[in-house]
Image: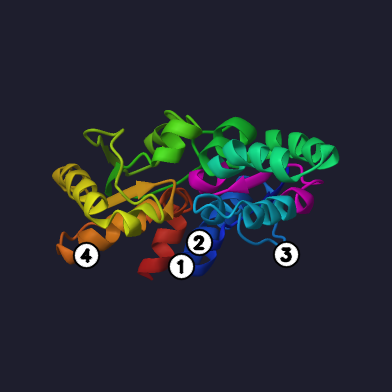
Amino acid sequence: MRASLFITCYNDTLFPETGRAVVRLLERLGVELEFRPEQTCCGQMHANTGFGCEAFAQAKRFVRLYQDSESVVIPSSSCVAMIRDQYAGLFEKYGDEELRKQLASVLPRIFELSEFITDRVGVEDVGAYFPHRVTYHASCHGLRSLHVGERPLRLLGKVRGLDLVPLANLDRCCGFGGTFSIKNSEVSSAMLETKLHDVVSTRAEYCTALDNSCLMHLGGALHRQYAGMQTIHLAGILANTEESATEKKA
């Protein structure tokens, strides 16, 4: 099985360890990964702030770049939601029939990481080991746009040594929302405070999610409150094995 890795500009810039974790994880599962360095942004930040032409340029580049890929795996439900939910409208407004055909061909081969592992690779036990107390935050795009459902929880449930603690009000937004947290900072901060109460109440060592954007928002607040809890992308947990844990100790 082959797959192209779209790492997202957010992870590339701020959380490169997520991309490395995805590579370790999927190669361990027998996936032949490729990385296309010509990739750029999916266009979400342009589309969400009213720059349709600029978003279309990024969307067109993405579709053409991955036209021949067997699968495209993306460790961000936010970017996958952008591709599935907004590309069609952009291509309808700015594109032509040929581009719309190319988009229709690519869309079924786009996967968020937990979708790719469970639906495409067909496994839930990835051989991971993570001896820590963990809670899972369901990001809005994964929950409401992609409807990933129990996939991340099923994957976490198979991780050896992991104590999975349910998070109250799982469907509650963390308040990040990209530029929403800047343009509506007071509302965003209030939402974050409410979410943080539920997260801290789990007394977990780690909070995980499908999106580093949510984790950055939560992690900043946890740090400011000296809460002692860390954040980690789902890929970081699933990539960890007993052997790698032993190597770190050594």
What separation in Å lies between label 2 and label 1 (alpha carbons)? Answer: 5 Å
Mark 1 burial class by Cα count in 10 Å: few <14, some 14-19, many 20+: few
Q: Position of residue 134 (x, y in %)?
A: 28, 45
What separation in Å lies between label 1 and label 3 (alpha carbons)? Answer: 19 Å
Pick the front one: 208 or 245: 208
> Which numbered marker is on residue 14?
1
Kind of residue at disc 1: Leu
Q: Which residue is mark 3?
A: 38
* Mark 2 touches mark 1? (CB < 8 Å): yes
Kind of residue at disc 2: Asn
What separation in Å lies between label 4 and label 2 (alpha carbons)? Answer: 20 Å
Pick the front one: 7 or 63: 63
Kind of residue at disc 4: His
Comes first in the chain, label 4 or label 2: 2
Which residue is found at the position 76% from the left and 42% from the top? 70
* Mark 4 touches mark 2? (CB < 8 Å): no
Q: Which residue is mark 2?
A: 11
What separation in Å lies between label 4 and label 1 (alpha carbons)? Answer: 17 Å
Colour convention: rainbow
Q: Position of residue 200 (x, y in %)?
A: 17, 48
Comes first in the chain, label 2 or label 3: 2
What separation in Å lies between label 3 and label 4 (alpha carbons)? Answer: 35 Å
